Amino acid sequence: MGSIFYIERNGQKYAYESTSVRVPGRKNPKTMKTYLGKVDPETGEIIPKESRSRPKEEYAKHYGAVKALDGIQKQMGIFEDLDAVFTTMAPNMMGAAMALAMNPSAMDFLHYTVEGSVIKETCRMRGMLSPSAIGDLSEEIGGMTVAMDRFFGRRIARDPASFYSLDLTSVSAYSGMEGWAQWGHSHDNEDPKQTDIAMVTDAEGIPVMFRMLPGSIADMAVMRSVAEDMQGMGCRGRLVTDRGFESAENISALLDLGTEFTVPSDAKAEPIKKLMTMAVSEMRKAASHAFHEGSAYQYAEFEVGIADLDSGYGYVVRIPANQKDSRENNERFEKARKLKAFVVYDPKKAADDRNQMMSMVHDMELRLEGTRPRDPEKAYRDLPASVRRYLDYSVDDGGVMHMVRKDNAFTFADNRSGMSVMLTSADTTFDEMMTSYDVRDRVEKAFDVYKNDSDGGRSRTGNVERARGRLFLKFIALMLRIRIQNILRMHDEDAKKGTVKKDTVCGMTVNEVLLSLNTVFAIGNTGDWRLTAVSKNVREIFRLFGLEEPKSGKIVLA
């Protein structure tokens, strides 16, 4: 795609396209000038020239999806932020991300999508994204970590959110990636040689930043560094995580940073277990009942301290004066920094917990009850620990194995079913905690899109900068796809409520929308293009996204 310039003659402005062409045997390229048409003095738009004859060669390129994605990225200010940070690289980066959003595939295949669409013309790309070119571009991007952070900072500043969600996933690698792919626990039960990706999304699930990490780093070790990075980029919203990130050390770090947070506890620490026991009596009170987003809950809230113990940071809660070591414990509690803990009872979750427990127990009872295993002890040991917690066994004189349920374990499970503990910053209310935790699944859905819709499988390069650069391009594509997904979801919800009329877009997925948009083609050659017919479905998609509808007929690709 060349550059467009204008010439005025007799009060009329004319548009031309200047293109550099390599000529064999000449050192310098030759400049080709193509007339595009007149410029409308009122709108500034180019009126395509009237061609007396069709060009000898014409091409058909996908137009609809590119036009829509370009409109969406302009609404989000993506190219504007890329251009401010990466300058001359921005057009090719935007083009690559749009190609990935349209057709999630391996990076080496992106050039097929670019060549078969108007991405190059729309983004004013330089050259094509051949496998070698996309490799070089990815490697250059991956080495510009400071520029990436500047881009993330611009995204956070552009639309500050009340809540930010953090989660971690693993990506298996074919190589060691210069030490970044390491053996460790896989989040998706894949090959354990992997790198990890920590991603932060806003309350709508739109990614705002990510970190590529060595695969051996535990979830708990990630949160402090990501929280510090987010604060450095100007993020002041509440940080929400899922299970796996909670530890007294991490909570202490968030208190140090002054970050508001909502973090679920794994309830393994003894002080947290005491709160769950105390909550049982608190939930007998009428004030413990609450209603949130159409569901009933019961809750009790407590003050929790973070104390600097000999073994490191630990939780401490106030205990009754008649309990052992209460004086020493409560003195430590008074001196500790404070946060809040909500013990929440969810009746729906309680039923699910009981069903899950009984399903496991029932299956194992059917499997072993009345059998004569050669080694009953080994047969019992081979059971999962989650089942052995509830079952014991005996063997009668005839060598027949009988399963015995543990009364205390069942009573404990019944008391704890449906209960969860949420740790929050001290000034948090129940509604704030619940509202913030409702957005936790947005980052999980973002990872689902990344893994399933955006070729987020195994890393196909051994170069760490190239891998990081590819991840950044997928990150941009992910922003576009999730924006589309969110608008489609809200449209479906509004249609169900009856606030908007059902149309042909209702029920469509992101892929179905992009495929439908790709029924609109641009047909022609340099300076002489026309659009094919635009269907009702395509017009409704453009209207839904607040974009100007394309019209069949002559157009200028610029």
Image (spheres, grey):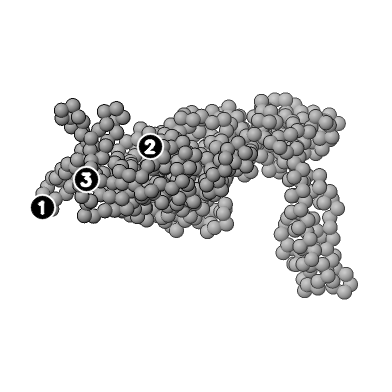
Give the residue type that dot 3 points to. Ser
- Quadrant containing the N terminus in the rendered view: top left
Mark in the foreground, 2 or 3 = 3
| Residue bearing mark 2 | 79
Residue 179, image x and y in percent?
44, 51
Q: Earlier in the sequence, mark 1 or mark 2?
A: 1
Residue 294, image x and y in percent?
71, 37
Residue 455, image x and y in percent?
46, 53
| Residue bearing mark 3 | 51
> Callout 2 environment at 10 Å: few (<14), some (14 to 19), or many (20+)?
many
Mark in the foreground, 3 or 1 = 3
- Circle 3/circle 1 CB separation < 8 Å: no
Q: Where residue 25 is drawn, which disc sits there?
A: 1
Mark 3 to mark 1: distance in Å? 33 Å
Give the residue displayed 41% in from the left and 34% down from the top.
77
User: In the structure shown, which secondary structural element does the residue marked by tag 2 occupy?
Assistant: helix
Whether 20 is drawn above or below 192: the answer is above
Q: Earlier in the sequence, mark 3 or mark 1?
A: 1
Q: Earlier in the sequence, mark 2 or mark 3?
A: 3
Out of 342 and 530, give the one closest to the viewer. Answer: 530
Mark 1 to mark 2: distance in Å? 38 Å
Relative to 479, 67 lies left or right: left
Give the residue displayed 45% in from the left and 52% down from the top.
515
Residue 275, image x and y in percent?
76, 36
The answer to whether residue 347 of the structure is visible from this angle is: yes
Give the residue type that dot 2 points to. Phe
Out of 379 and 503, give the one closest to the viewer. Answer: 503
- Quadrant containing the C terminus in the rendered view: top left
Give the residue displayed 27% in from the left and 36% down from the top.
46
